[in-house]
Image (cartoon, grey):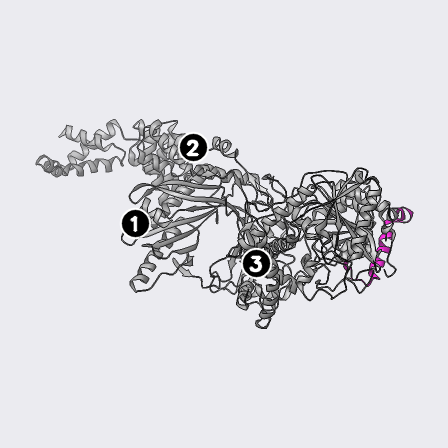
């Protein structure tokens, strides 16, 4: 059972600002989905390996050869705020 | 982990200093980044001119692993006496920072490429083995420039992703270091090994970044980030020891926290951000398939160059030089290469003295590298010395002149007339000095042995230092 | 609906520019909101430059789901947070399409970040089902399927993470394929759940879908999960199923399956039987857990894949900047819709300390069991046949209020993504004027057999000839 406090924490962990008055609503919806996920506990997975990759593939590499990169204009072209070729972000703290 | 470390190496002082290091080394001798083909020669270029959809983390981009980066990482692992992980996988480390374009860093978590190694260093109490916990591969984030220069006072953060995606090897030690000085020595030794392996140019800015963990007497550990030089590491740790000691003396407690090293002010500051204990939610990177490199280790081991410790031993046995000299000569690959070239042409013992003691001293004083001196010049110098054609003093003078102004030994000898004063010139000078200084001679004959030095000095003055002092002394004694 | 062969004939008779212009007119006159961005200028210019292009799709218009990167053309993923984002590069499949001479005429509407089963979560409004505008077209590639079903374009690309090509194909009465994982390069596909998703071709008939598949499938060194396998899939367009062994998994006819759907699918099985195939019931006991496992994995991956949207390098940025972490949280709160936010929160939770074993790792183990179900079932059968969706298209607004109800519609499609096997959906019947989809699943890398099965079924029935009166 997740509480509004949990939702708030998850919001912070995901960097998603959630309004105070919406926390309850989210908790309700998320709980019903998590309840459904609880079904997985019924499955006996003793000795079963997790599937991280659905195909059995290993060792895919590229060679250490230089390829063309984007121009500065294209690299920063979509940025909402830039300065002197840098991306401009707010201060950290 | 701490108890284990203490069992191997108890505290060296009553403060109980315990230090571990995390070093991020850029594999900048590769041509390209770890997951894309962008070039690495960005140091003098405009920001964001060495990027592509992959290292910018543009939506839809995918990483592809640089084969050579894996080879280099295994090389380093082997040189650090680590076991190489045969079956390994990349993971996502999820956290948020403006220099991290995807909101996660592709790194290794379980199954680092190398683990359980060690490096020997000169500890406070003799040669000591510092254990390496692991070395793993990951990608470098971008570079942040804080407006105004300080992370605390800046209004904006400027981001340059030229560095984003450079292949990094993160090397983590056990907390086996017992003083800031040892930490510094460890870093110097590591840099040396990396230089020998030719996988990283550690002189480039940002190529070797250090996070240090330090605790006193088993108390809480503080982590210091943003250290970018070996001297800086020593300073930061010294500051931390003082800070923590003072805190404890005042009855406070040392909290486990991350502190930021301000190189300019020489202090560490607490970063009071909202980032509490990180939950990185590590899970395997599905865009990269696992790698199996079981057979790579032995193949790569064959290509390993002679490493510093082995080279040092060989210098001692092959060139019959003192271990002290061998240590000094092999502490930098360029110096070791220089020495070997010279030692192949002249007396190795003399070459060792003149390279390790004299030349290195003059270079350190000027804070320049051995590239400033030509091997031919030292060969010439050492030859002249062994043939007794110039004095040691002249030798030193020649080195200084070359470093200060340029030139070569024979030209300088000519222009300054440094060839050893021989035969008549010396005899004449001796006779003159004896006749000009009756009192000191008389004093000497009366028992004041130091008085002879004065007369020797006079002869040296007359010959402009080009006479052999020992010979002069003998000649004077013969005459009186 | 239009076919590729008719299009190519029309191009020969008039010109590519004229054909493309007509196509653009149809799209611009449409009110189903299938295409959210008409790329008129680029299309006309590309058509002009064609000359006598030798490519197999020379001059053929195609719509591209808006989560596939198109250089110089806005790509939004149906979201506000990428409004105005113009990729500086083409996805691998786009490069292949251009090399084949295809003409991109528009970006197709989709559920926001491919999270949905109805195209109702798009920031740019829902798409209407051409068979009944009160109904959803399915999702998340609703726009791609609808524009083909409405006779606006002959071809479209979608993406399928948990059924997002097959579901709208089923609801819109068109043909859609989710290939084996790794067959089509994901380079340029904006990621939702990267261990599950594949780009998929959509067309009005099996042959056209296969032509498109042929062009876009194949190895790409920029996608490490891309499989080196070069084939000509058109060789599978053979009208013959003699000796074909069909497996019918009973778990795919669960409660909630519409009786018309059940009957149509069984009719299809019997049709194939009459053409020389045999069938038997197979058991896939972990099917009922597949949905939970799928959502845990998909949401976990999504929570990480969507972390990059912070408004610094592209996308939405708000007027006021606070400190970085706060700004980041505010931008995402404003830029993402409710369903996306829910999935990010749940995904973060499933990966978080203390819960990773219970949710994420457990789901990965169940994934293994689901994959093994397929291996066992396909051990002595060639294909598996089942309904694509338990019902025909539902009404707009009917399921969107409760997330869980919507998730449950995916029961028959998600197990395929977990196992990574290929699967086609094509029309096999109607219920109250709404199409019913037949799902044909196969072994890894055996697209040929499912294509052959689909083609044979199609050629011996006439469902693919039906067009909606409404469209």
Decide: is C207 above or below B429.
below
The kind of secondary structure element at disc 1 is loop
The kind of secondary structure element at disc 2 is loop
- Callout in the foreground (3, 1): 3
Tell me if C429 is positioned left or right of A10 in this view. right
What residue is pinned by disc 2? B306
What residue is pinned by disc 1? B11
The circle drawn on residue C348 is 3
Q: Is residue B130 visible?
A: yes
- Residue positioned most to the right: C13
Tell me if B240 is positioned left or right of B107 in this view. left
| 3D distance between C-alphas at marks 2 and 1 | 34 Å
Q: Callout 3: few (<14), some (14-19), or many (20+) C-alpha neighbours within 10 Å?
A: many
- The residue that appears at 47% across and 65% down in the rendered structure is B153
Extent of the magenta region: C9-37
- The residue that appears at 84% across and 62% down in the rendered structure is C29
Instruction: Residue B457: name its quadrant.
Output: top left
Q: Are marks 2 and 3 in contact (CB under 8 Å)?
A: no
């Amino acid at each position: 059972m997740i509480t509004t406090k949990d939702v708030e924490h998850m919001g912070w962990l995901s960097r998603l600002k959630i309004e105070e008055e919406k926390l309850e609503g989210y908790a309700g919806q998320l709980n019903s989905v998590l309840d459904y996920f609880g079904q997985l506990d019924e499955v006996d997975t003793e000795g079963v390996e997790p599937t991280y990759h659905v195909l059995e593939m290993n060792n895919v590499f590229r060679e250490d050869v230089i390829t063309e990169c984007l121009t500065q204009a294209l690299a920063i072209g979509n940025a909402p705020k830039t300065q002197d070729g840098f991306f401009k972000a707010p201060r950290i703290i | 982990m701490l108890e284990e470390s203490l069992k191997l190496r108890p505290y060296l002082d009553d403060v109980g200093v315990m230090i571990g290091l995390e070093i991020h080394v850029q594999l900048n001798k590769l041509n390209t980044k770890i997951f894309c083909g962008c070039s690495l020669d960005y140091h003098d270029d405009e920001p964001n001119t060495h990027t592509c959809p992959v290292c910018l983390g543009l939506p839809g981009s995918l990483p592809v692993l640089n084969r050579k980066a894996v080879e280099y990482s295994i090389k380093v692992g082997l040189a650090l006496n680590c076991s190489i992980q045969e079956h390994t996988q990349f993971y996502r480390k999820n956290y948020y920072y403006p220099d991290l374009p995807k909101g996660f860093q592709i790194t290794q978590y379980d199954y680092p490429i190398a683990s359980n190694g060690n490096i020997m260093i000169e500890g406070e109490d003799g040669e000591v083995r510092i254990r390496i916990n692991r070395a793993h591969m990951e990608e470098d984030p971008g570079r942040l420039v804080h407006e105004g220069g300080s992370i605390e006072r800046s209004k904006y953060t400027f981001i340059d992703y030229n560095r984003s995606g450079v292949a990094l090897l993160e090397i983590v030690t056990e907390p086996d270091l017992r003083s800031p000085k040892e930490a510094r020595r460890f870093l110097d030794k590591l840099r040396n090994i990396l230089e020998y392996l030719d996988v990283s140019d550690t002189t480039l800015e940002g190529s070797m970044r250090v996070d240090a963990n330090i605790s006193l007497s088993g108390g809480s550990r503080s982590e210091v980030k943003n250290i970018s030089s070996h001297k800086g590491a020593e300073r930061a740790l010294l500051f931390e020891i003082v800070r923590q000691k003072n805190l404890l003396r005042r009855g406070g407690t040392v909290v486990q926290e991350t502190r930021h090293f301000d190189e300019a002010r020489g202090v560490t500051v607490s970063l009071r951000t909202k980032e509490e204990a990180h939950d990185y939610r590590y899970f395997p990177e599905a865009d990269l398939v696992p790698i199996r490199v079981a057979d790579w280790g032995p193949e790569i081991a064959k290509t390993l160059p002679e490493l510093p410790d082995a080279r040092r031993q060989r210098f001692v046995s092959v060139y019959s030089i003192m271990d002290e000299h061998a240590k000094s000569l092999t502490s930098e690959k360029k110096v070791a290469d220089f020495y070997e070239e010279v030692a192949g042409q002249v007396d190795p013992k003399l070459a060792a003295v003149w390279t390790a003691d004299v030349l290195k001293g003059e270079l350190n004083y000027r804070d320049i590298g051995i590239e400033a001196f030509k091997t031919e010049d030292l060969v010439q110098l050492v030859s002249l010395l062994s043939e007794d054609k110039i004095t040691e003093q002249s030798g030193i003078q020649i080195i200084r002149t070359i470093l200060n102004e340029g030139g070569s030994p024979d030209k300088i000898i000519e222009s300054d007339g440094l060839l050893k004063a021989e035969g008549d010139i010396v005899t004449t000078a001796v006779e003159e000095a004896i006749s000009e200084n009756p009192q000191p001679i008389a004093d000497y004959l009366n028992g004041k042995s130091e008085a002879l030095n004065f007369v020797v000095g006079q002869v040296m003055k007359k010959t402009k230092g080009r006479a052999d002092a020992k010979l002069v002394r003998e000649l004077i004694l013969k005459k009186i | 609906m239009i076919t590729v062969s008719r299009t190519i004939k029309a191009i020969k008779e008039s010109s590519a520019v004229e054909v493309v212009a007509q196509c653009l007119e149809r799209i611009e006159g449409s009110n189903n909101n299938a295409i959210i961005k008409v790329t008129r200028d680029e299309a006309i210019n590309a058509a002009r430059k064609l000359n006598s292009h030798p490519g197999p799709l020379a001059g053929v218009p195609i719509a591209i789901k808006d989560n596939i990167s198109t250089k110089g053309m806005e790509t939004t993923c149906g979201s506000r947070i990428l409004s105005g984002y113009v990729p500086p590069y083409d996805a691998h499949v786009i490069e292949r399409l251009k090399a084949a001479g295809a003409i991109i005429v528009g970006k197709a509407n989709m559920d926001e970040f491919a999270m949905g089963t109805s195209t109702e979560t798009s920031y740019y409004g829902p798409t209407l089902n051409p068979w009944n505008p009160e109904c959803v077209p399915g999702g998340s590639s609703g726009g791609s399927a609808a524009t083909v079903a409405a006779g606006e374009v002959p071809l479209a690309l979608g993406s399928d993470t948990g059924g997002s090509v097959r579901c709208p194909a089923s609801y819109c009465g068109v043909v859609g394929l989710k290939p084996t994982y790794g067959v089509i390069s994901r380079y340029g596909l904006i990621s939702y759940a990267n261990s599950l998703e594949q780009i998929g071709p959509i067309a009005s008939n099996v042959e056209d879908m296969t032509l498109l598949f042929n062009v876009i499938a194949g190895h790409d060194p920029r996608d490490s999960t891309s499989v080196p396998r070069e084939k000509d899939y058109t060789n599978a367009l053979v009208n013959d199923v003699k000796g074909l062994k069909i497996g019918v998994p009973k778990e795919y006819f669960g409660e909630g399956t519409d009786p018309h759907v059940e009957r149509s699918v069984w009719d299809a099985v019997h049709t194939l039987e009459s053409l020389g195939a045999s069938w038997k019931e197979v058991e896939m006991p972990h099917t009922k857990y597949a949905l939970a496992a799928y959502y845990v994995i998909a949401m976990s991956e999504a929570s990480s894949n969507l972390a990059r949207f912070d408004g610094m390098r592209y996308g939405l940025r708000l007027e006021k900047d606070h400190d970085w972490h706060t700004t980041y949280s505010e931008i995402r709160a404003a830029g993402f819709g409710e369903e996306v936010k829910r999935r990010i929160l749940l995904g973060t939770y499933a990966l978080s300390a203390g819960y990773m074993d219970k949710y994420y790792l457990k789901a990965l183990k169940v994934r293994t069991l689901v994959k093994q179900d397929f291996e066992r079932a396909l051990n002595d059968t060639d294909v598996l046949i089942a309904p694509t969706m338990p019902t025909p298209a539902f009404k707009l607004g009917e399921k969107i209020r409760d997330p869980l109800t919507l998730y449950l519609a995916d029961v028959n499609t998600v197990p395929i993504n977990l196992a990574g096997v290929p699967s086609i959906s094509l029309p096999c019947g109607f219920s109250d004027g709404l199409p019913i989809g037949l799902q044909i699943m196969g072994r890894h890398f055996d697209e040929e057999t499912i294509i052959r099965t689909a083609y044979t079924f199609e050629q011996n029935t006439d469902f693919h000839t039906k067009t909606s009166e409404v469209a």
